[in-house]
DNA sequence: GGGTGTCTCCCCCGCTCGGGGGAGGCTCGT
DNA sequence: ACGAGCCTCCCCCGAGCGGGGGAGACACCC
């Protein structure tokens, strides 16, 4: 049976584009559309889509609120794929925190869009999109050069968080990181939580994967 | 017949601890102790232990030198298990390059210590730090090509374990892996435990790190 | 036939992890 | 002086994770 998708975006053009791209696939079926997050709940209840592709920025109810609402009120909720125009949109991270399963850039190529829908439908999370890559690339070797430090300041992760992430990628537990940094485990937990949240990772394993996938750390 | 072990550490306390832990096992016997690497060679010649548990940092001759010396001058040399306080101690990698068969953290739990001794005694390597690289390089892209499959057969990981590790590197939880493979979570736990054991990893995060570091999976 | 290895599933148990809160002190820029 | 951001530490709590056992079914090889 095909993957069923509900489109939620205030721009009809975007909806049409998504529909065209997705309907071109034999195994994907667009079963409905909505122009605002406020209309999502009843539609989800009625259509029971596998995936909801939802814009973050919408007039009445934004994608974050809508995501929370769906996950809170619907049992066996659909997978939620957040659509956004800009990478590093702070809304994206909020949406992921709210329980979204992945996000999608409007300017992504059709093949990537299709891929994203299939992935979340299968239950995998799209946590490590291209944006993380660019973001984390700024950290570079990130040892002591001033440019990297400056980048750290304006980027998502704080210096401390980046340091904690680095230790996570070396396989250290929270207690070990605490000992290494000479702080309490509670402090480490705070930083780890911040890292997970900012990377859209569910646990430290996914964060480490993101670190490798983004170039934050490199094998070898 | 029991596994015979020679302890080499400059701290008597550590030796006592190791002895206590290991002697508690019916199949492990501590046959001697030394306080420095310089004393190892004659002891190995006389006692012919199966395993030498050796500290890296010692006053006169460190564990690396001692490892090289033993492997160079003794025929049918014992397995060498490097003991260290810190992970990512550069000495550890050097020791493994020098020919050590595994490494052991001083803060490891007794069960882990026992496990490590048994593993190296059986000829298996505790691979997590460095040498996974060579082993797992054989898996390559490892999709369907016959050579990779053949490698899987003779290598440490079974096909199922390799598949589970692959899913672990995609950030899936045990429950998600179980759903994907259409088996019970208990089954997945068994495979995950086997993977952790074979890779010498303490948790799934370290296993994923090993997978990246070894080339089992590649970023991007 | 018997052994070996793999895959499957089960029990119990303890611990780490991560989320949910909150809070105080610090530096910095305005 | 004030707020913003960061680092630090604290509480409670549930869930997932990992260890240590064991066990049955099956295929393969000697």
Image (cartoon, coloured by chain):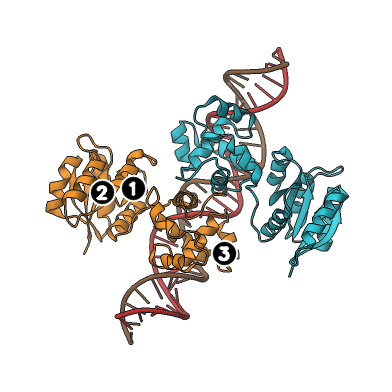
Chain colours: A cyan, B orange, C brown, D red
Q: Position of residue A48 (x, y in %)?
A: 79, 62
Q: Going from the N terminus, do you reach mark 3 or mark 1 first? A: 1
Mark 2 Cα-neighbour bin, 10 Å: few <14, some 14–19, many ≥20? many
Q: CA distance from mark 3 to mark 1?
A: 31 Å
Label at residue B104: 1
Mark 3 falls within which chain? Answer: B
Q: Which residue is mark 2?
A: B53
Q: Is residue A37 above or below residue A119?
A: above
Badge 2 marks a residue whose secondary structure is strand
Q: Is residue B173 left or right of residue B37?
A: right
In this rendering, the answer to whether A146 lies above or below A77 is: above
Q: Is residue B150 left or right of residue B22?
A: right
Structural distance between the alpha carbons of marks 3 and 2: 38 Å
Chain assignment, label 2? B
For the point 50% across and 42% down, the residue is A168
Q: Going from the N terminus, do you reach mark 3 or mark 2 first?
A: 2
Residue carrying label 3: B178
Residue B160 coordinates in the image, percent (x, y)? 48, 66
Same-subunit check for callouts 3 and 1: yes
């Amino acid at each position: 049976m095909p993957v069923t998708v509900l489109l939620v975006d205030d721009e009809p053009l975007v909806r049409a584009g998504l529909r065209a791209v997705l309907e071109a696939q034999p195994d994907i079926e667009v079963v409905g559309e909505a122009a605002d997050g406020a209309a999502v709940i009843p539609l989800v209840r009625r259509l029971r889509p596998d995936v909801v592709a939802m814009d973050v920025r919408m007039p009445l109810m934004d994608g974050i609120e809508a995501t929370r609402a769906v996950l809170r009120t619907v049992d066996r909720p659909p997978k939620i794929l957040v659509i956004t125009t800009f990478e590093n949109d702070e809304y994206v991270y909020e949406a992921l925190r709210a329980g979204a399963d992945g996000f999608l850039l409007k300017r992504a190529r059709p093949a990537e869009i299709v891929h994203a829908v299939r992935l979340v439908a299968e239950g995998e999370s799209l946590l490590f999109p291209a944006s993380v890559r660019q973001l984390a690339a700024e950290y570079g070797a990130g040892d002591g050069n001033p440019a990297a430090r400056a980048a750290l300041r304006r980027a998502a992760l704080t210096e401390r968080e980046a340091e904690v992430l680095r230790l996570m990628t070396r396989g250290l537990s929270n207690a070990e990181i605490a000992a290494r940094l000479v702080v309490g485990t509670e402090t480490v937990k705070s930083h780890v939580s911040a890292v997970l949240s900012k990377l859209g990772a569910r646990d430290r394993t996914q964060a480490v994967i993101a670190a490798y996938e983004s170039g934050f750390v490199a094998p070898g």
